[in-house]
Amino acid sequence: MHADFAFFAHSTERADRQDWQLLTEHLRGVGDLAGSYAAVFGAKPLGQIAGLLHDLGKYTAEFQLRLCGGARVDHATWGARIAVERFGSLGTLLAYGIAGHHAGLANGRDTAERTSLQDRLRAPLPELNPQWQQDIALPATPLAPSDGFKPNQARGQFQLAFLGRMLFSCLVDADFIDTEAFYQKVERRQPTPRGSAVALSALRERLNHRLASFKTDTPVNRLRGEILAGVRSHAADPTGVFSLTVPTGGGKTLASLAFALDHAIAHGLRRVIFVIPFTSIVEQTAAVFRDAFGELGEAAVLEHHSAFVEPIRRDDPDYYQSDKKLRLAMENWDYPIVVTTSVQFFESLYADRPARCRKLHNIAGSVVILDEAQTLPLKLLRPCVAALDELARNYRSSVVLCTATQPALHCEDFVGGFEKVTELAPDPEQLFRQLERVTVRHVGVLVDAALAEMLRTCEQALCIVNNRRHARALFDAIADEPGARHLTTLMCAKHRSAVLADIRADLKAGRPCRLVATSLIEAGVDVDFPIVLRAEAGLDSIAQAAGRCNREGRRNAADSEVLIFATDNPDWAPPPELTQFAQTTREVLRRHGAVPLSQAAIKAYFTQLYWQKGEAELDAHGLLGAIEAGKLAGLPYELLASKFRMIESAQLPVIVPFDDTARTALRELEYAEGCGGIARRLQPYLVQLPRAGYQALRNAGAIQPVQPERFGEQFMQLVNPDLYDDCFGLSWENPAFIQADRLVWAN
């Protein structure tokens, strides 16, 4: 068709339109890509249809005028309307993603923010040119959810909602990549490298080479070798849900990686995703993997701590259209090894925004290792388990619950739990007896002066408390002692890694090392102290703290103490939920005090905790009920995204120019067109702040956006170095200091 009568998807500055992207080219390209992504979970036709219909509203005179500078026009709803008319109930499911492929998934009805899907489908639209029916061939055959779909009668609507979000992921990722390729071609830029060419088989070969040098020269190392062999013997087991119950220090990180690679290769899976509860150990774990893979490590491992994505611009529905979407630092997890956080993983599985959902389809066909599985928040436990179960049931994924303190998530212990869980470790009960390396006892109330005195008396000791303010006060009390150190989440990951490296060096050399920290030290951080002091907490936390004591088994268990203490200072009182955990621990220890960290004690702890909470409190926002009650026409996507928060208070990222690498990346960002690779390099330099602290620094001028005209406020940089301390990280909690800083900057 002559250019004057052609329909276009994307425009450039050329008035003759010779390099504009034809709409048919874009729709077919996105359809092919989305279909290939959905094929992994047996839903290729659904992905293709979503891609073919997503920009159908561009077949209107109004949108074509928009490309020439005309008024805004809704171009997403026509495709949603045709999907419903042509494909019935599954068409309705597709309509959510098609209508929301720029602004995000809306509720089916009854929404306070975005216009609901029902309202959009009923709204008047510009006239659709019939040319689309000649350009696009839609399948005439009836549609099914996916090949071999396994229904769960108790969660039927949940399964549909989950499928809708996964198809949305396929669509928005395909749309992004096709649009990006068009603009890169027009601007004669090099195509963005996608994923990694490193094969899982090559990674396994490097890992095997590394493991072959492992020495079984101590009793602990011999047991680690037995654990590794036992875990790998399950590689050919059918895909599903697994548990790996190994004591802390039992080598489960590399054992789980070895199993995941073996299992993925045996079943033709695509990648391994490690989900870690704390950002403090994402970088550590990724570094262990890179080291294990040798020269392939850098190209194979993706760290994804957090998303540099600014909020949806509800006042500008065109914001995510055309080349503007390319300015969002979105990851799509197309690497063979992904290391990410629990917050990033689970909140994305319940998200509504294109940037957060883009990566979800790449979870299908993966081995998901849930490290420290016991840390899942109780208020969201049932929704988390439902999502994991669905991944294993219908998305060709295997899920491994990896921890020393296995939560009781079988269906007989937990409503809506897993029907079958295969244990990978050889005889966990025996392993725990063999790896018993500490003595645990409760020492009653310890005031801060007594705690500080104990830390002064012990040249090497770790004290773990329940909030940052208490940790800061204790550190201040011993700051003049040799080897006094402090760890906090207000340090960026690079800073924490440097501090931990110094701590390990001091411990190994026998130098004084007195560390005060919050629970960030517990999950997977490889340190070995002769004594650990732990403020009252859940039994799982105490077990994790015990894993930082006599980790290598070089001392007698009787000489390696984990001392649980209470505090009578109301300023250090834990939140109510943590108080309940501590109370449950005390009750369990009365029955299992002789072996407080046994498998029986751990199971009793979780079973009692779940019983005390009750079914409703394990889905505190009633998310699963809202999905089932909404039915297909009222899926509450926007509600789910707003309510599913692993951390109640929103956390916002600030980039700390901690070293030359960070400063170089920030300078590059000043002149960059795209930002994905640079954002990846900046992740280890982030500090996540609550909104109040973020806003205080913003108001003071202490943080400022990098290149806001291109990237908005995705990249907020700390510009006042005085606010970042070598001991305490980023300061924001002192209002007087912030106020004084505001006056300095104002001048």
Image (cartoon, rainbow, N blue to C red):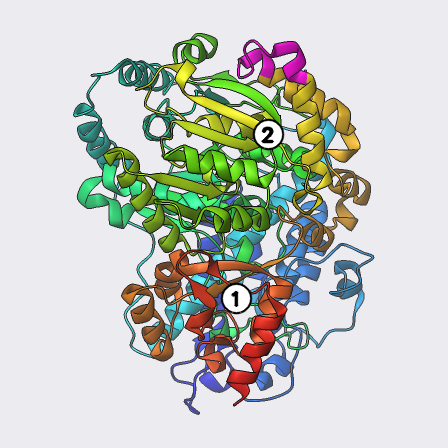
Q: Please state if 736 lies on the left or on the right of 455 as rendered.
A: right
Relative to the observer, which residue lies in front, 384 or 164? 384
Circle 1 packing at 10 Å, graded few (<14), some (14-19), many (20+), is some
* Image quadrant in which you'd find residue 292: top left
Q: Residue at x 70, y 26 (%)?
A: 583
Q: Which residue is mark 2?
A: 565
Q: Please state if 564 lies on the left or on the right of 522 as rendered.
A: right
Relative to the observer, which residue lies in front, 519 or 558? 558
Q: Which residue is mark 1?
A: 135
Q: Which residues are magenta?
A: 588-601
Q: Where is residue 52? Give x, y as percent.
A: 54, 60
Q: Amino acid at mark 1?
A: Asp
Q: Earlier in the sequence, mark 1 or mark 2?
A: 1
Q: Amino acid at mark 2?
A: Phe
* Image quadrant in which you'd find residue 134: bottom right
Magenta segment: does it hold 595? yes
* Image quadrant in which you'd find residue 441: top right
* 122 vs 286: above or below: below
Mark 2 lies on a secondary structure that is strand
Q: Where is residue 430? Give x, y as percent.
A: 43, 7
Q: Residue at x 77, y 61 (%)?
A: 116
Q: Which mark is residue 1?
A: none
Q: How far is mark 1 from mark 2, CA to CA?
A: 72 Å
Q: Where is residue 377? Give x, y as percent.
A: 63, 38
